[in-house]
Image (cartoon, helix red, strand yellow):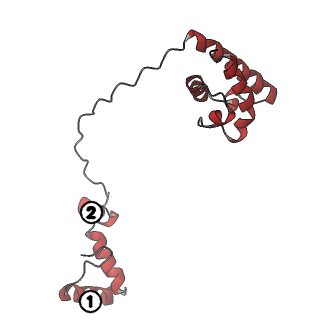
């Protein structure tokens, strides 16, 4: 059967569909569509017909859960990074207080970790970090300035 084609193709099945259409006052297309739904195991009509009015498909047997690979350990914050982290956190809290926002609205902890990992020294590099565009770009210049001040010389 071609995709989108009807499963009702033999002369006998076409005749039966025509008789059912006349008997129930429906079009032949409507009857053929309902029959095709009953032949489709993913269709609700099939499920109700073969698994009862509750329409519940018998559960598939469960397999034992597979163990997930252990997550990579989070790198510890180095001593040189802790100063940068502290300064960025201080900036975040003072900006949040100044603007009357929650601290995460300035930048999130995930964004802080990304800044500590990537150490962007340009506003363009900072905007490559997920979430540092749009409204948060107003903090970009200051964040880059803080990161530059902690760059190795």
Residue at 24% across, 40% down: 62
Q: Which mark is residue 19?
A: 1
In the drawing, does residue 55 fall left or right of residue 129? left
Task: Categorize mark 2 by other alpha carbons within 10 Å: few (<14), some (14-19), many (20+).
Answer: few
Labels 2, 1: front one: 2
Residue at 28% across, 66% down: 40
Of the pair 2 and 20, the residue shown nearer to us = 2
Residue 100 x, y percent position in the rendering: 79, 29
Residue 56 x, y percent position in the rendering: 30, 54
Measured along the vertical axis of the image, is residue 48 above or below residue 74?
A: below
**Mark 2, secondary structure of its residue:** loop
**Mark 1, secondary structure of its residue:** helix
Of the pair 47 and 104, the residue shown nearer to us = 104
The part of the image, by quadrant, that contains residue 67 is top left
Residue 59 x, y percent position in the rendering: 26, 48
Query: Where is mark 2, residue-wise?
Result: 41
The part of the image, by quadrant, that contains residue 121 is top right
């Amino acid at each position: 059967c071609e995709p989108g084609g009807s499963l009702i193709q033999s002369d006998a099945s076409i005749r039966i569909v025509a008789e059912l259409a006349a008997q129930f006052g429906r079009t032949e297309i409507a009857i053929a569509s309902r029959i095709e739904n009953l032949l489709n195991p993913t269709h609700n009509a099939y499920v109700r017909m073969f698994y009862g009015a509750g329409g519940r498909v018998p559960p598939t047997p469960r397999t034992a859960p597979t163990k997930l690979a252990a997550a990579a350990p989070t790198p510890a914050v180095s001593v040189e990074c802790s100063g940068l982290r502290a300064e960025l956190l201080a900036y975040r809290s003072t900006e949040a207080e100044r603007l009357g926002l929650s601290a995460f609205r300035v930048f999130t902890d995930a964004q802080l970790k990304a800044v500590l990992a990537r150490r962007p020294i340009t506003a363009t590099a900072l905007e490559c970090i997920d979430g540092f565009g749009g409204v948060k770009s107003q903090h970009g210049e200051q964040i880059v300035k803080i990161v530059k001040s902690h760059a190795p010389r």
